[in-house]
């Protein structure tokens, strides 16, 4: 039986074991999926353990960029995003970093019928999730703006994701975008929301939060009350996991099997 895992810190909320379990059940491809929740000081020894014993693993906050130094090679998807969320093992034992978040995010937009091709979007945050979302949108959106509390980090992401129409902003815009995407962790705890002083949700048409637990964050609630089409991160979680399982085990699923899993996340 294949052994896969998720590594991160402070990830007791994760639904990844359920999602991967359902994908493997539907594909009749049994595999064991573990959770490694540990502080950053333990990353070197955990990386060594995974290299020796794991067939492949996922990466979440705060290790999507830090894990890169422990890998042997980056797939073009990870090199472009500057972040890794999936690691596969090559036939010769080398660990290869991939980013299935970017494609998974775009798949999720299609699932929710949110069309951003040729439209402007605002990304909140500059971490690994924001990098993946920016990579997914940078060549599709007419304009893509990144806002982060630490302006320098937004500048770095915009500079590293070459190509496309990406800019960083020091001040949070008041509106003027088709969609706003929350890629910060604000919302994981009850009552949290990214600070949005004077932001006018009514100037947008859609709001997306890459958080999936809780299903509706304060951010999405405010957007919904302003009449926006909203989507949480459940579809993104599913599609990035399906792409990871395809890398690990060659799994694909027909669309008729997808909706039930996403709705159960």
Image: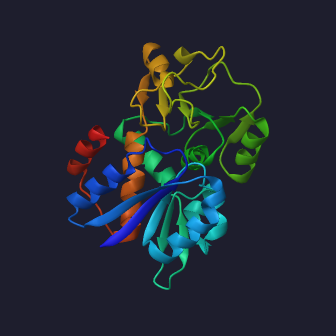
Q: Residue 38: percent from the left, percent from the top?
A: 55, 54
Left or right of 91? Residue 45 is: right
Q: Residue 175: percent from the left, percent from the top?
A: 62, 20
Image quadrant occupied by the N terminus: bottom left
Residue drawn at x 61%, y 22% as measured from the top left: 176
In the image, residue 110 sits, relative to residue 71, either above or below, namely above
Q: Residue 36: percent from the left, percent from the top?
A: 48, 57
Left or right of 265? Residue 206 is: right
Towards the viewer: 30 or 125: 30
Left or right of 246? Residue 146 is: right
Residue drawn at x 32%, y 41% as measured from the top left: 265
Q: Residue 129: percent from the left, percent from the top?
A: 56, 45
Residue 23 visible from this viewpoint = yes
Residue drawn at x 36%, y 49% as measured from the top left: 238
Q: Quadrant of residue 149?
A: top right
Q: In the current view of this chain or complex, which residue is farthest to the bottom?
A: 92
């Amino acid at each position: 039986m294949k052994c896969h895992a998720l590594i991160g810190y402070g990830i007791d909320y994760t639904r990844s074991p359920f999602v991967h379990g359902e994908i493997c059940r539907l594909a009749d491809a049994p595999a064991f999926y573990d959770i490694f929740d540990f502080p950053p000081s333990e990353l070197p020894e955990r990386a060594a353990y995974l290299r020796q014993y794991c067939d492949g693993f996922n990466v979440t906050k705060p290790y999507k960029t830090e894990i890169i130094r422990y890998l042997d090679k980056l797939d073009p998807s990870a090199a472009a995003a500057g972040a890794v969320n999936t690691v596969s093992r090559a036939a010769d034992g080398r660990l290869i970093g991939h980013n299935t978040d970017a494609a998974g995010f775009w798949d999720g937009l299609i699932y929710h019928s949110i069309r951003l091709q040729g439209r402007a979007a605002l990304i909140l945050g500059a971490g690994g999730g924001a990098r993946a979302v920016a990579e997914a949108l940078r060549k599709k959106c007419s304009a893509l703006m990144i806002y982060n509390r630490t302006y320098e980090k937004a500048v770095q992401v915009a500079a590293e994701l070459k190509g496309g129409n990406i800019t960083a902003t020091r001040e949070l815009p008041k509106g003027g975008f088709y969609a706003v995407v929350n890629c910060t962790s604000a919302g994981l705890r009850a009552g949290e929301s990214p600070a949005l002083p004077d932001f006018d949700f009514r100037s947008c048409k859609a709001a997306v939060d890459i958080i999936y637990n809780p299903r509706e964050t304060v951010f999405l609630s405010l957007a919904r009350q302003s009449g926006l089409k909203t989507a949480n991160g459940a579809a993104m979680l599913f599609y990035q996991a399906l792409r990871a399982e395809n890398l690990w085990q060659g799994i694909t699923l027909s669309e008729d099997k997808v909706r039930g899993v996403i709705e159960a996340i």
